[in-house]
Image (cartoon, rainbow, N blue to C red):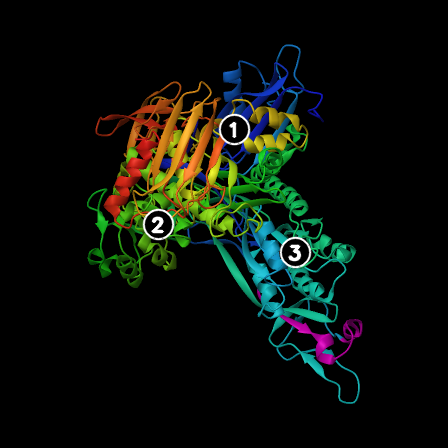
Amino acid sequence: MPASLVSNNSLLAIDVGAANTRAAFFDVVEDQYRFVASGVAPSTAEAPYKDVSEGARNAVLSLQGVLKKTLLDPTSRGIIAPSQPDGSGVDAVVVTVSAGPAARALIVGLLKDVSLESARRLTESTYARVLDALYLGDPRKPEDRIDDILRLRPEIVVFAGGTDGGAAHSIRSLLESLEVACYVMPEEKRPAVLFAGNENLKEEIEARISGLASDFHFSANIRPSLEEESLEPAEYDLAQMLVAIRKRNLRGLDALNLWAGGNTLPTAYATGRMARFFSGLYGGGKGLLSVDLGASSATIAAGFPEQTVLKVYPQFGLGESLSELLRHTSVDDILRWSAYDIPPAMITDYLHQKALYPSAIAATMEDFAISQAVAKQALYLAMQAAQKDFPKDAAYIRPDLAPQFDPIIAAGAALSDAAQPGRSLLMLLDAAQPVGISSVILDQNNLLPMLGAAAMQNSVLPVQVLESSAFLSVGTVISPVVKAKYGAPILKAKLIYENGAEANVNLKYGSLETLPLANGETAKLSLSVSRGADVGFGAGRGVKNLSISGGALGVVFDGRGRPLALPSDAVRRRELIKKWTWTLGGE
Amino acid sequence: MLAPVHHIAGFTTVVRERLLPTAGEVTARNGQKVGASDVVAEARWARKHALLDVARDLNVSPEKADDLIQCKVGDKVSANAEIAIGRGLFAQTVRAPKDGRVVAVGNGQVLLEIEQAKMELRAGLPGTIIQTIPQRGVIIQASGGLTQALWGNGRIDSGLMVNLMEGADSVLSAERVDVSMRGSVMLGGMIKNADVLQALAELPARGLIASSIHPSALAKAREMRYPIIATDGVGSLPMNSAAYKLLSTNIRREVAVNAEAYDRYTGARPEAFIALPITNEPPISNDTAEFAPEAQVRLRRPPHMGKIGVIVAVKTGLTTLPSGLRAPAAEVKLENDETVIIPLVNMEVVG
């Protein structure tokens, strides 16, 4: 089993999703790591297969077909590792997993607005749903808390609270309910417990809880003081706990983990790792945003200079949780994104039916329009939820809007269809509503989490692959923050190409415009904006000769204002959506 | 490509694992013949506890309180029984608030289990127990007609099947229900509102096999004490022709309706099973298949959702669909002889 990638060349990354399992092959080409090819197959976590390794093998077989190279040993059905003189095999394997139901979580903290909030934010960094919370001031009687824990049967307990060296009595009192509930539970139903509170209590907590938990982790205090929050070390521990739960629940994951030499990570955590890594490399003063809209969840990973925010929302995934989406939104809010006049009943039917068959795809234009509207609203909700936890010192143009991000990386089947980059971009512009100047990249092969898992061992590979053509650059998006009358001029742009040619845009409020700038090309962009409009340089201030990169759609100017206000008149709204879609190259 | 299988079979043998969610007692024995409603295993678990803080009530340290506690783990106690007695002239006593069982003692506290929940696991279909799994459940084998469904309200029962459908696209209304149907399992069509569910409850009915249930009626359907299954899911969908043919040709037969919720991970699905007299057991249905020519399939997304067809050919490579998406697909001949292109992920093999 390979232990290090540094001294090896090729890498096989396997991502086990709720709907699909992907296998991607990376190798050294002309002294640079490159993404070579990928294969995909339906995931097999569910009945009747109930073995994720089957889907992984099928994905690898599909990859083999593209590579014309043998990776699977036909006898043992395992991966051939390391690579062999005859060209077969691979030097290293990494695995990421998002398949499986969201883990049921209980959070425990001392103060409702302090450590309990930190516990919630930590729990939202993985595939879990918070079902209950214990905190000081919880009005329930101790026995009622115990009964509620027993009824909910949490799989994960995230326990935070207490400053290091601070008062221990309150923590002991909360611990008691958990301890008793775990004691009463059947052994096979006991939860995994992560304690990330007062570090001085480590030994006592471990002595009291570790024997009563299916898995016990002690992490650095996520709230070492009232003012300070530090989630990252605990996020890794929580990720490990989730993999342990998945290994128990998903047959075949053990075998994949063995192929990977133990290098299995939750997909979201691996994505977050890359957001952190790349924001350090490319982010500048702005943040880096990765959005992944998949069947199991919507994952938002935002890397800022001082902090990374990782949010996983199973409730906004496009799979089995769709039947519950209307708990978080309305049919009207979904329909507002559609260019077609769709009866509301079709939306409710779609949500229930798609929840039954998450891997099914839209075959007709009408079904596709519904799926796009639903996906857009799910992503919009995820972004709105994540925004609450973005750092206050991020690069905001206005505090009630998203901070400035550059680049923005989009993944997930609904978002990253390379055949229709205009549709993907419009979904991103509508749902994420970026502000200022951002380059937008589509991760059409869902490589980002795979690179995040690979980065555990080889920090060179992700950088070299990201700088290759493995990702599709959509282009640079200019989104001024402005309020104006529809049709009022808000921005003038001049683009000077490398060959000296010039193109101009006179952007009016409410419209989308594009200028061509091919992938791999750069140009100098000068902007002058109307009074009150802000593209990140201050209200009314433009920029001269800013170097920007091209992409599939070149340079896109989004003059629709922030927050995006769609016309309330349905007919006019649908006309505008059609026009915007057409502007971005869609039908 | 691997294909999921949706079981609709006129005569087949099924093997079903019926397991408790937690350890309990298996009440059926190997070789026993069971009916759908027969209890095969049961489990009890504590639903409500009382935590007695002896140390606080007697105003002593937890260590001291432990010495004063009179009961031990496993003891059954009656309401008002002495749990701990203080010392001194005016000693206080801590008493059990209700009948219960001691489940934990320590740190100056006593935890009593004062209410239990009991779960009875029913067979779900008439058949023979072919294996018992200690403390967990049984495996049952049965032969007969089977149709799986996509939605169920979690109940189990059986009865003679009465047909309230005039065709696969019938809508069931409360006016169709009358007292002569009491104790029967109804073969209904689309359920568009909750009134008909209430009318069936008032009979009472022993079950409802619907083609689909409108989302607005789901909450009511979950409340009903009789089993309800929807063969084609949630919405306004006619019954797929294979299920309709099977069910409508077995009217007045005993049908078991196991409306357990669809669980994609365990494979549990709501289903209706028709017990048939047999001389030779038919083969056990496969749970997996391959998409291949001649395979009968059920289509699961628009524009032909719920239709039954036969694969003519599996296309090589990726096919561009009217939606613009590209996916592996097959040519499928529908029952009206129309041939359509369907992405493989939008089909399941009927078998």
Task: Give the mark, 1 or 2, whose residue is nearer the N terminus.
Answer: 1
**Residue A22: image tag:** 1
**Residue A333: image tag:** 2
Q: Is residue A42 left or right of residue A371?
A: right
Is B115 placed above or below A496 here?
below
Q: Chain of mark 2?
A: A
The quadrant of the picture occupied by the N terminus of chain B is top left
Q: Which x, y percent locates residue A287?
A: 55, 41
Residue A86 in magenta stretch: no
Frontmost residue, B308 versus A453: A453
Q: Which x, y percent locates residue B22?
A: 57, 53
Q: Amino acid at mark 2?
A: Asp
Q: Which x, y percent locates residue B208?
A: 31, 52
Disc 3 marks which residue? A159
Residue neighbourhood size for the residue with mark 1, other residues' Cα within 10 Å, grouped as few (<14), some (14–19), many (≥20): many
Residue B48 in magenta stretch: yes
**Residue B91: image tag:** none
Q: Are marks 3 and 2 on the same chain?
A: yes
Q: Are marks 1 and 2 on the same chain?
A: yes
Q: Chain of mark 1?
A: A
Q: Is residue B260 left or right of residue A189?
A: left
Q: How many marks?
A: 3
Q: Amino acid at mark 3?
A: Phe
Task: Give the mark, 3 or 2, whose residue is nearer the N terminus.
Answer: 3
Q: Is residue A547 left or right of residue A238?
A: left
